Image (cartoon, rainbow, N blue to C red):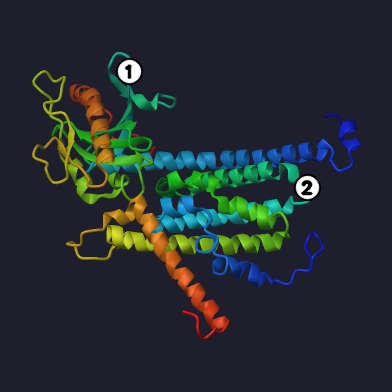
Amino acid sequence: MTDSKGRVDTTTSTDEFIKGLWRENPVFVQVLGMCPVLAVTNSGINALAMGLATTFVLVLSNALVSMLRHFIPRQVRIATFILIIATFVTVVDYLIQAISLDLHRALGAFISLIVVNCLILGRAEAFASKNSVGRSVLDGLGMGLGFTFALLCLGCAREILGNGSLFGVALFPAGYQPWIVMILPSGGFFTLALWLLLFNHLKARQQAAATPLPEASP
Amino acid sequence: MSSADANATHSQPSSWPLYRALVGVGIVCGLLIVSVYVLTLPVIARNEAEALQQAVFQVLPGAVSRASFVLTADDNFRRAVEGDDPRRMVHAGYTGDGLLAGVAIEAQGMGYQDVIRILYGYAPQSQAIVGMQVLASKETPGLGDKIEKDLAFLANFRALDVSLGNDEQTLLQPIEAVKSGSKTLPSQIDGITGATISSKAIAAILRASSARWVPLVYRLQGEFAEGGGSDDGQ
């Protein structure tokens, strides 16, 4: 398979999809889009909804950017990408209002935040503007689901510790004193740090297993 | 820059593709946004009307039908018709026997993040607020948004006293928010730990709105009795 510049591309479509889930996870590896990661992960349901809405915008904007990639000159690409992203965010906003006002009320404050999620502009610029529509959609889907997965990791941990519940269902007996700091902004930083620690540890172990270490390494 | 200038330097592209891309993408995006807006507008309006109707029944326990009234310029209530100012509207709820269960009143005020819109039910017979529901708020998720979900907080509004003094113009005890667990008066609202500003905002909205509407609705409650549930479901 060759891309627009005629380079031979050896990655398979499955790779494009899988890479966002794990190897290039937008949050745990690329550390992109930290604003929603920290701001809206104080409950599992908020994290899930934000993740899915972002995935929707990411897939559609990747698809349109890729479709128009030969039509958009480099000089005006940022302006047009932002316009495309803002359009899909507005579309999502109206669609959610039409589907369910309750859902919109739960998400209202976050939806507009998607416009400024650097993950989406990052994928448009780094991937969709250089690859075919099919690959861009797979890339968007993988990245979006990887982002959702990461948000869920944070959201569930923070909701359990900070509110004593998961997806709104109380987990502990009535006497449990929730650890309120976890749903406050500082709790977001603590939880993110711990997840990053875990993921880096896992990655280091994976690499260590792949390449045999020299005997004397401390 | 004219196109002749642009073509003169070989490495510089002419400005035409730039205009074409920006205007083209602008037109596509504009069409997309406007068509989605136009397509979803009636659905959203219907959702909002349904939500308001549901909310009226939520904040007025026992009500099975409703009718909207509008405050006229000479401080009387008449049946609302299309195009009336929603800010001057109240919604009367009636029991199965056609008796007035109470009047649902919309109010709004500044919260921690943005304007909070609420609907509350006032029962003139018991001179109390008998229900409250948040219609729209952008309070901090997980903290301020507890004003919508916290059961202990919502229990404050099952019988929140708004009795009028002898002059029937002012409230005996204005509504106020107190620290969680320290409610002593029937006109006080037990606040939420971690959502102090939002719970105080609800108290302030109710205090301001009840000072304006409660004396009016109490004095004119007879005007609602005539409307006995003839336009429910609108």
Which residue sits at x=57%, y=45%? A91
Name the quadrant containing residue A4. bottom right
Q: In the displayed structure, would residue A71 be above or below residue A215?
A: above
**Label 1 amino acid?**
Thr
Relative placement, left or right, of B85 versus A2 is left
Q: Position of residue A215 (x, y in %)?
A: 51, 86
Q: In the displayed structure, would residue B73 be above or below residue B19?
A: above
- Eye-nearest disc, 2 or 1: 2
Picture quarter with the C terminus of chain B: top left
Name the quadrant containing residue B118. top left
Picture quarter with the N terminus of chain B: top right
Give the residue pinned by disc 1. B72
Q: Is residue A60 visible?
A: no
Query: Which of the pair B11/B166 is nearer the observer?
Result: B11
Q: Position of residue A168 (x, y in %)?
A: 32, 59
Q: Secondary structure at mark 2?
A: loop
Name the mark on residue B125: none
Query: Which of the pair B166/A87 is nearer the observer?
Result: A87
Circles 2 and 1: CB distance less than 8 Å?
A: no
Give the residue pinned by disc 2. A71
**Label 2 amino acid?**
Phe
Q: Is residue B178 visible?
A: yes
Q: Are marks 2 and 1 on the same chain?
A: no
- For disc 1, the chain is B
